[in-house]
Amino acid sequence: MFQRYFVERFRSELIYWGIMAIVFMFFRNNVQTISTLIIVAGAFFAARFSKEIHHSGNGVAYFMIPASQLEKLTVAIVITSFYYFAMMMITYIIGNLAGTFLNNLLASLDFFPNALFHHSSLQWKYFEGINHNFFTFQDAGVNMQYSAPFFVGFLLSQSLFLLGGIYFKKNQTFKTFSVLILFFIFLSIVILIEGKLILDVTSFTGKDFENWDSNLFANAAKIFYSLLPLYFWVVSYFRLTEKQV
């Protein structure tokens, strides 16, 4: 399965990662932009990974491969999550090296004004901030906080869009994103209703949670979000099995 993927998509993979390296040349020192690019581009990558199963000709060829559903899904998970993230880091290194070299080369030329290019040392700002958070829930009023590590958030995003790519036949990325938006809207409404009925409040503030154990909340949230990718991978397995049947 791995050999099939890289043999069939070698050229497209080479072009894709070449483009990513060029993009990193221009945004090599912007940690937030790099993180956003990894999440957004990864979502498209994961959602479109299984598009061939929705086409009659390619789908028949895919399901006739002598491999189990678990093996096929394992390959999809490894490529869309771990391989993709590793390649993003490699292309960031290449883009950072090339961008710094090109910048210093142009800065040494008298043709360009100093305001455009100036000599700078090689920096690894993204690796310096590699422990930055995917999101943070915090309320200073009660000192309640939980921060999801970026890689956990990345795995969660990839598992969601991989499931969407298996589930939806067309426009997988757009439909998966739309479902997420509707889910968060529904969840917000449920939280507001529960807050009004249970806590008898019209809005949430830090004082509403004064009796909560912040460490218990943080640990529960950490376990919950860490297990979510595994849950969506399991759902993807059953969905792939149904698709094959």
Image: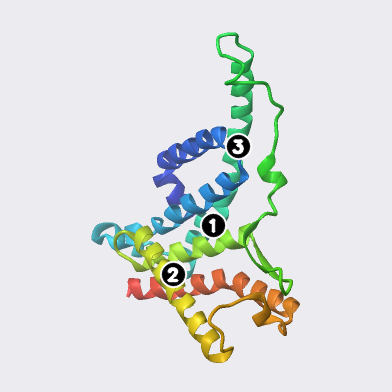
Residue nearest the observer in this picture, 78 or 40: 40
Amino acid on which the number 2 mark rests in the picture: Gln
Task: State the residue position of label 1.
Answer: 81
Q: Which amino acid, mark 1?
A: Ser
Q: Is residue 112 left or right of residue 148?
A: left
Of tags 2 and 3, the one toward the viewer is 3
Residue type, label 3? Arg
In this rendering, the answer to whether 98 lies above or below 108 is: below
Nearer the observer: mark 1 or 2; the answer is: 1
Mark nearer the N terminus (2 vs 3): 3
216 relative position to 58: left or right: right
Q: Position of residue 140 (x, y in %)?
A: 71, 68
Q: Considering the numbered disc 3 on the image, is that residue within a helix, a strand or a loop?
A: loop
Q: Quadrant of residue 118?
A: top right
* SS assignment at label 1: helix
| Residue 89 visible here | yes
Looking at the image, how many numbered discs can be counted on the residues?
3
**Residue shown at the point (24%, 61%) measured from the top left:** 56
Q: Position of residue 188 (x, y in %)?
A: 48, 75
- State which tag comes first along the sequence, 1 or 2: 2
Which residue position is annotated with label 2?
69
Give me the disc on residue 28: 3
Q: Look at 61% across and 41% down and name the residue there.
A: 30
Write down the quadrant of residue 66 in the picture.
Answer: bottom left
